[in-house]
Structures are given as structure tokens and as C-alpha cells.
Image: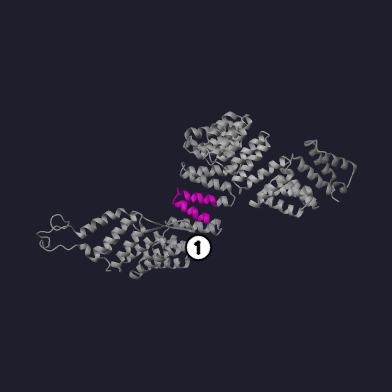
């Protein structure tokens, strides 16, 4: 194709908007997106109509007559039959099909156009871009390589080929294409940026940095390169250089929010919270209405346990932007954390006045009312949360408590039974129902509810665990163990079921190695006091007294008023010959549980100076 021909000018005009953009959101992120240029279709159609012509005479765009150079009596021949017009016709069809989202059709039309005009580098490149929309990278590469055969010095084609290889993670090939683009046009700044990121993806950070520095020296105002350089330094753990690069970005663009966020994140990653807050304050100097920065500051203040300062910051946001639900929600949560129930009720009430559909705010409002012991009003709020809400399972537990507290347990049971009958038979529904029956001291009804739940959900470990607990409370130890084993079969790392069986073995002094394994697995899943107690008790039974003491002291710190934990700790101290410590914790255990005959005997033994042989350790 001869440069400057009408056809080249036409493609350039009609496809001016149909190019491939590259958006970088990080070193490893490169996305392709076609620019919608359907506005050009109208102009292309006008040109097409002008070239095709209409019927002869006054009705045509080029009417016949004196001075026109056309013979009014000549036989009319459609220009659409000519190769040039046919190529434009298929091109126009492709544009229309692409605008309608029919990329398969667009590709087919462009292939027709290419077949008619195989020497048009631009058409080949457009076909490659169309293939990209279909994620057909193999054909896209073939098409863009055909474009380069026709026009080897096409910078856009080299960039497009590089982008395709980059997307396929062929970083070396991508870099080669970008380098060729730079050789052809040393001022093409986006090529430098793409090349630097390709190097970074290949972990060639030195080349990436050098490439960015090259374009920054050429184009100091190229902010994207400065920002990418800052990110590269951050990835390389070069904090000082990264901060310098971010500062250069902000010097050129004082209101660039992303740079402030990333620079603040740099300080946060170094656990320099005051430094991060200072950066976000700088952003507010540039833009006092940057509410995202104010939220960042409040978040960091909460992390520092500066709740009052966080409240001040969030209150400022609400004053400036009353519709900021997130700020109001955080204010309410801080009030809950501070146990300021009245303020929490007021805050979440304000949120619901603005938007009554805010289920989360209603849930927190109900919680605050409940903690304020305004049970009737709390119940009213929780009852407004619909079953389809994601918060409904948690709401049920509050409803159960409130109904029970208000002596309306029968009403709660009826409501849950109604939900189950309406096909809301989630596992937690049966657990809540069983819990309500337990609250009424109706264990048989609780067992029936859980039995029904297990029959509906035979693969739900939580139901078996709950079933085991109810059996245990009724003294059905074997049934309880059977249920717990079923729970573990379904979930081998179910911590509470593991702990239950491990403690059972410890009490019997049997299968202690298996019990030890189960307790350790349980503790790995859930580091709580009663599981630490189980592990410590097993160590004691294994006569690993120092390890027993260590675990039982941890358990006692978490459960300082648990008489069983204190008894076990006393046993460990006695086994280690630490009689005074043993006496202290055993006396506390007996004070908490005066009916514990075994602890009383142990204290009497200490007073008589008995050795470990009388502790069941022989």
C-alpha cells in the first residue's frame, strides 16, 4: 500500500479511536481493553455512501450533469463491486458488529477485509485487536506479525505484539518488542514504561530501574514512570529511594491520592504508624475533602487504641459529609467498644433514619440495646431483620437469648419451627431450636431437634458436636463420644470434638498418646483456655510435669476463676514439689467449688506432707 493513499487516510480516520489501551495498576497487572469508538461508524458510513454512490441523476451524492465529467447516459456500475469499496464495506460491518458486542462477527468481517486488501498493515493490526477481545492470543500474534511484515517500522504494531506476549507472560519476547518500538521512536514514553514492567516481571530489577530513569530524564513530567519507579523500589525493599520517588510524584502532582496512599502504606509496612498518619495529613492539606484519607487516619488511630482521637476524626467526616454511613458505622462501633451504650444506640439510630434498609446498623443497634438491657426494644429491632439477610443466623442467637430473657421461649420455638417448616432448614436452625429447649430444661426435645437436624444434614459436623454435648449433659457418655467421633470423621480438625475425646481419654488415663495428638491439633485450631487445660492435664498424666505446668499456667491466665483448671495446676505444682504454690491454687479452687471433695482431700494431704505417691502417680 502506497503511504498517503486514500485508503490509509480512511483507516486512520475511521479507526482513530479503535486502539488498544494498557492500564497499569501495579508491576504485575496489565489489562487490555478495547476503546469503544462506535462514534466513528457514522462518519465511516458517510464516506462509504459517498464512495458507493446512489442511483444516477439528482438523487446521488455525486449527481450527473454538465460539468461533472460524468456521462449521464452511461450504464451505472456499483462502486461496491470494486475492491476498495468492498474492503471498506467489510470494515464498516466489523465496526457495527463490534459496537453490538458481536466480536465473532467482527473478526469474520475483518478477515474478509484483509483478504481483499492483504497489504494493509492497519487492517492486520485491527484484526489482531479483535482477536484479543476473544482471548485468541495465537491468532492475535499471527495477525500482528502479518502487520509487521507489511509495515516493519510500525511502532504501534511492535507495542501491540509486546502487550500480547506480556499478557501471556512471555516476558523476554515482550521486552524485545518494546525495545524495537523504542528504537523506532525513542520519544515513545509508554514503550519505556511497558519495557520496565516487563523487566520487573522477569525480576531484572536493575534493567527495569535503568529503563525508567532513562525516560524520566527525557520526560521529567512523565508521572506514571515516577510512580512505577517508586513501586519498584518498594518491591526491592529500598524504602528511602521509594519514598524519594513518591515525593517527586507528589511534588509534580500535590493532589495525587494514589501516591499518598502508597507512601502512607510504605510507612505502615514499616510499622511507623505516626509517620503514616503524617503522610495522610499532608494529603488533607492538598484536599481537605479527601474523606478516604480521613478514614485511613481514623483506622490507624483505632490500631493505636486512640479511640477518642478516632471518634474526633470520624465526627469531622460526618459533619462534612452527613451521608457517610461508613463513618457513622465506625463511630457506633467505637461506642460499643467503649461500652457507651447510649451513644451507640443514638449513632446507629441516626444511620437507620438515613437508610432504614441498613441491616448491619440495625443489628448493631439491637446489640447496643441488648447490652443496655433494653430487652423489649432490642427484640423489636432484631425482629426487623429479614431471614434472607446475611446477618440472620447471628440474629437468631440474639432472638433466642431475648425471648428466653423475656420468658417468651415458647414464642421463639414456634418462630424457628415455622421457619423450618417454610424450608429454611439450615443446620443452625436446628441448633438454635435445641438450645431453646435446653434453656427450658427439655433435653429430650433438644435431642429430638438435633436428631432431625442430623437426618436432614448428615454431613454437618456442628450438629454432631452439639448432639454430643447434650448427651454428655444427660450423662450419656458413650452416645456423646459416638457423636463427637462422627463430627471428627466429617471434620478431622474440629477443635471442640477433638478436645472432648482427648479430655475423656485423659480422665481415664487411656490412649494418652492419641489424646496428646488430638489435644495438640485442637489447640492449633483454637488457642483457648479449656483446650490448654486439656493439653496440660494430658502432659500431667504422661508425667511430663514441666510441660504440664507451662500449659496449665497459660490456661489459668485465660480462665482465672475456673476451679477445674486450678485443680489441675495444683496437681502439676505438687508433682514438681512446689507445695506452697499447689496449696494456693487448690485453696482458690475449693473456694470457687466448695463441694469438690477431691480438692479438699488434696489440701489435707498437703497439710500432712504426703508425697506424689498419694496423688495417683505411681
331 falls in the magenta region:
no
Q: Can see residue 142?
A: yes
Residue carrying label 1: 201
Q: Residues within 10 Å of mark 1 (few under 14, many from 20)?
A: some
> Which residue lies at the image location 51% right of the left edge and 65% below the top edge?
204
254 falls in the magenta region:
yes
Q: Position of residue 163 (x, y in %)?
A: 42, 62
Count of numbered marks:
1
Q: Quadrant of the N terminus?
A: bottom left
In the depicted view, which residue is nearer to us: 562 or 285? 562
Rendered position, 590 above or below 29: above
Q: Can see residue 15?
A: no
Colour setting = one colour
Rendered position, 108 above or below 585: below
> Which residue lies at the image location 45% right of the left edge and 48% below the top edge?
255
Q: Position of residue 168 (x, y in %)?
A: 46, 63
Highlighted magenta segment, given as a residue range:
241-265
Q: Chief secondary structure of the magenta span?
A: helix
> Which residue lies at the image location 61% right of the left edge and 39% below the top edge?
432
In the depicted view, which residue is nearer to us: 361 or 136? 136
Q: Position of residue 302 (x, y in %)?
A: 58, 42
Q: Secondary structure at mark 1?
A: helix
Left or right of 152, for residue 89: left
Amino acid at each position: 500500500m502506497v503511504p498517503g493513499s486514500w485508503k490509509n487516510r480512511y483507516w486512520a480516520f475511521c479507526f482513530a479511536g479503535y486502539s488498544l489501551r494498557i492500564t497499569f495498576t501495579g508491576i504485575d497487572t496489565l489489562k487490555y481493553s478495547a476503546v469503544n469508538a462506535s462514534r466513528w461508524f457514522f462518519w465511516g458510513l458517510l464516506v462509504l455512501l459517498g464512495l458507493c454512490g446512489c442511483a444516477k441523476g439528482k438523487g446521488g451524492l455525486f449527481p450527473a450533469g454538465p460539468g461533472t465529467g460524468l456521462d449521464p447516459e452511461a450504464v451505472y456500475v456499483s462502486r461496491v463491486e470494486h475492491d476498495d469499496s468492498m474492503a471498506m464495506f467489510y470494515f464498516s460491518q466489523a465496526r457495527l458488529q463490534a459496537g453490538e458486542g458481536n466480536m465473532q462477527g467482527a473478526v469474520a468481517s475483518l478477515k474478509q477485509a484483509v483478504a481483499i486488501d492483504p497489504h494493509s498493515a492497519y487492517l492486520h493490526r485491527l484484526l489482531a485487536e479483535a482477536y484479543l477481545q476473544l482471548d485468541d492470543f495465537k491468532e492475535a500474534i499471527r495477525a500482528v506479525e502479518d502487520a509487521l511484515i507489511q509495515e516493519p517500522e510500525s511502532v504501534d504494531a511492535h507495542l501491540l505484539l509486546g502487550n500480547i506476549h506480556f499478557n501471556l507472560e512471555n516476558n523476554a519476547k515482550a521486552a524485545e518488542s518494546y525495545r524495537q518500538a523504542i528504537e523506532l521512536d525513542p520519544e515513545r514514553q509508554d514503550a519505556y514504561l511497558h519495557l520496565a514492567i516487563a523487566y520487573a516481571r522477569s525480576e531484572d530489577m536493575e534493567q527495569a530501574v535503568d529503563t525508567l530513569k532513562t525516560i524520566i530524564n527525557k520526560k521529567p513530567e512523565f508521572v506514571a514512570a515516577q510512580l512505577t519507579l517508586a513501586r519498584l523500589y518498594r518491591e526491592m525493599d529500598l524504602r528511602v529511594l521509594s519514598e524519594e520517588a513518591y515525593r517527586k510524584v507528589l511534588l509534580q502532582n500535590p493532589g495525587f491520592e494514589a501516591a499518598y496512599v502508597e507512601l502512607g502504606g510504605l510507612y505502615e509496612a514499616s510499622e511507623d504508624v505516626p509517620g503514616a498518619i503524617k503522610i495522610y495529613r499532608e494529603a488533607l492539606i492538598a484536599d481537605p475533602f479527601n474523606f478516604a484519607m480521613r478514614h485511613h487516619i481514623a483506622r490507624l488511630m483505632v490500631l493505636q487504641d486512640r479511640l477518642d482521637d478516632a471518634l474526633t476524626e470520624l465526627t469531622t467526616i460526618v459533619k462534612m459529609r452527613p451521608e457517610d454511613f461508613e463513618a457513622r458505622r465506625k463511630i457506633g462501633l467505637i461506642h460499643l467498644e467503649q461500652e457507651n451504650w447510649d451513644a451507640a444506640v443514638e449513632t446507629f439510630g441516626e444511620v437507620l433514619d438515613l437508610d432504614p434498609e441498613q441491616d448491619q446498623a440495625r443489628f448493631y443497634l439491637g446489640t447496643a440495646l441488648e447490652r443496655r438491657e433494653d430487652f423489649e426494644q432490642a427484640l423489636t429491632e432484631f425482629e426487623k431483620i429479614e431471614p434472607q439477610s446475611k446477618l440472620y443466623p447471628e440474629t437468631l442467637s440474639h432472638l433466642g437469648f431475648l425471648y428466653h430473657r423475656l420468658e417468651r421461649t415458647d414464642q421463639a420455638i414456634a418462630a424457628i419451627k415455622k421457619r423450618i417448616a417454610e424450608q429454611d432448614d439450615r443446620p443452625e436452625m436446628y441448633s438454635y431450636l435445641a438450645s431453646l429447649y435446653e434453656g427450658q430444661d427439655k433435653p429430650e426435645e433438644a435431642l429430638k431437634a438435633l436428631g432431625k437436624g442430623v437426618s436432614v444434614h448428615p454431613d454437618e459436623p456442628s450438629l454432631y458436636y452439639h448432639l454430643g454435648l447434650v448427651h454428655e449433659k444427660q450423662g450419656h457418655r458413650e452416645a456423646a463420644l459416638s457423636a463427637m467421633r462422627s463430627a471428627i470423621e466429617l471434620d478431622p480438625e474440629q477443635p471442640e470434638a477433638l478436645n472432648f475425646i482427648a479430655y475423656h481419654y485423659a480422665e481415664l488415663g487411656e490412649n494418652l498418646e492419641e489424646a496428646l495428638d488430638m489435644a495438640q491439633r485442637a489447640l492449633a485450631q483454637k488457642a483457648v483456655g479449656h483446650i490448654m487445660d486439656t493439653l496440660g492435664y494430658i502432659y500431667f498424666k504422661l508425667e511430663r510435669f514441666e510441660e504440664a505446668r507451662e500449659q496449665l499456667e497459660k490456661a489459668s491466665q485465660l480462665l482465672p476463676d475456673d476451679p477445674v483448671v486450678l485443680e489441675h495446676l495444683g496437681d502439676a505444682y505438687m508433682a514438681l514439689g512446689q507445695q506452697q504454690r499447689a496449696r494456693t491454687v487448690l485453696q482458690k479452687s475449693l473456694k470457687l467449688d466448695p463441694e469438690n471433695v477431691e480438692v479438699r482431700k488434696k489440701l489435707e494431704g498437703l497439710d500432712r506432707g504426703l508425697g506424689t505417691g498419694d496423688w495417683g502417680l505411681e
